[in-house]
Image (spheres, rainbow, N blue to C red):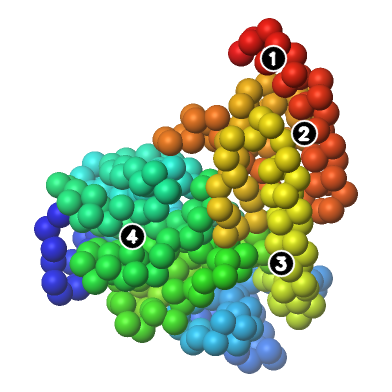
Amino acid sequence: MKIINDFNLNNLVRQNIRKLKPYQSARGELNDKNAILLDANENPFKNDYNRYPDPFQRKLKKEIAKHKDISESNIFLGNGSDEIIDLLIRVFCEPGKDSILINVPTYGMYEVCANINNVEVIKIELDTNFQIDTDKILASKSVPKIIFICSPNNPTGNIAPTELILNLLDNFKGIVVIDEAYIDFANEPSFLNKIARFPNLVILQTFSKARAMAGIRLGMAFANPEIIELLNKIKYPYNISQLNQDAALNALKNDKTSSRIIDILKQKQLIISELQKLSFVDKIWHSDANFLLIKFQYHNELFNFLKIKNIIIRDRSKEPKCEGCLRITIGTSSENSLLIDSLKQFEKLKVKSYEKNTIY
Ligand SMILES: *Cc1c(COP(=O)(O)O)cnc(C)c1O
C-alpha cells in the first residue's frame, strides 16, 4: 500500500460532498424558549412531541461529553452505529471507484453498507489467533479510503492490541475507524483519548450493548471536529427523534451500566467453566466482549437442538476461519442456566449416540 505521509482530509472527501450545500433548518442555533415558532409548519398545539427535535442533539451531547470527558464538538450521534458506518462510507467513498478495507471475520454491516453504496470491499483475513494482520493490510495493492477495525471484534470477541492499531494509524493516512461497540466489557482502554493525536481516527461506540439501550438506536462517533462536521453535513436533519434523545438522557441519569457489566462478566466466567466440562466443546475463544465464540463438534445439530429448546444463538460457522463456530451472547443468570442445562442434555441425548453411530 502506498504510504501517504501527510493527512489531508479534503483530499479524502468525495468531491460532491465537498461542494454540497447542506439542508438548513431556519431555526439554526436558536436558544430562546419564548420564541414564537412559525417557521417549520409544525402543529402549534402542545404535546411532548409536536416540535421537531434539536437536529444537533445539544443537550444529549453535553451529557455524553461529560461522561466521556471530551468536547461536544468531537461527538456525532447516529440512528445506531449502523447509520454512522453508512454516513462515513458516503462521505469518503466515491461509488464505483473507492474502496474500504475490513478484517474478516468481522461485523457484517461494513460490507453491507459498502455494497449498498457500490463501494469495493478489500478483505484481509485475521491471523490464526484472530488478530489483525497489519503487514498484510499495509501490503494491500489498492489503497482504501477507510479501514474498519472492530475491537473487540465481532464475532471473534478479542480486542486488537494497542501497538497494532497505533502502527496502522502511523502508517495509513486514510480514515481509520475503530468500532468499539464492546469496549466497555474489555479490560483495555478505549482509543478515545487518542483522537487529538490522530486527525484520521474515528471511534464508534453505541448505546446498544453495555448501555442496554439497543431499542432506541443510538450510536456515537468520536473524532476531530472536521470529520464530525462532514457527518453533520450529510445526515438527515432530524436523525435522532425526540423520544430517543429523551430516553438516552434518562439512561445516562439512571446509569446502571457498570454493575450490569460486572454481572455479565461474572456470568461469562461461569458459562466458560461449564463449557469446559463438555466433551463436544472443541475450543472457547478468549472474549473481551459480552459473547463467546465457541467451536463445537456437531455444531449444526447443536444449533438446531437449541432452536427446538427455544434458545436462539448465532451460527458463524461459514465465516472465514470459523468452521464449527457458534456465537453465544451472555444472558441473565436464569437464561444462562437454561442454556447450560440444554447443552448438558445435548451431550447426554445426542453426542453419545452420534459417537456410537458416527452419524454426522
Ligand atoms: C452490535 C454492534 C454494533 C451496534 O450497532 P448499533 O447500530 O449501534 O446498534 C456496532 N458494531 C458492532 C461490531 C456490533 O457488534
Quarter of the rendering occupied by the N terminus: bottom left
Residue positioned 73% across, 40% down in the render: 277
Q: Gap between marks 1 and 2, in whole Å?
A: 15 Å
Residue positioned 85% across, 40% down in the render: 338
Disc with the residue nearer the chain's start (1 vs 3): 3
Classify residue 157 as left or right of residue 139: right
Residue 188 percent across, percent down from the top left: 52, 71
Q: Gap between marks 1 and 3, in whole Å?
A: 38 Å
| Amino acid at dot 1 | Tyr
In the rendered structure, find residue 91 and report the number of the disc placed on it. 4
272, 327: nearer the viewer: 272
Residue 264 percent across, percent down from the top left: 74, 60
| Marks 4,2: beta carbons within 8 A | no
Quadrant of res 316: top right
Quarter of the rendering occupied by the C terminus: top right
| Marks 1,3: beta carbons within 8 A | no
Q: Which residue is mark 2?
A: 343
Front tag of 4 and 3: 3
Q: Which residue is mark 1?
A: 354
Q: Gap between marks 4 and 3, in whole Å?
A: 34 Å
Is disc 2's CB within 8 Å of ligand 1? no
| Marks 1,2: beta carbons within 8 A | no
Q: Which residue is mark 3?
A: 261
Could you tell me how many numbered marks the image carries? Answer: 4
Q: Gap between marks 3 and 2, in whole Å?
A: 24 Å
Mark 1 surroundings within 10 Å by alpha-carbon count, few (fewer than 14), some (14 through 19), many (20 or more): few
283, 258: nearer the viewer: 283
In the rendered structure, find residue 119 and report the number of the disc placed on it. none
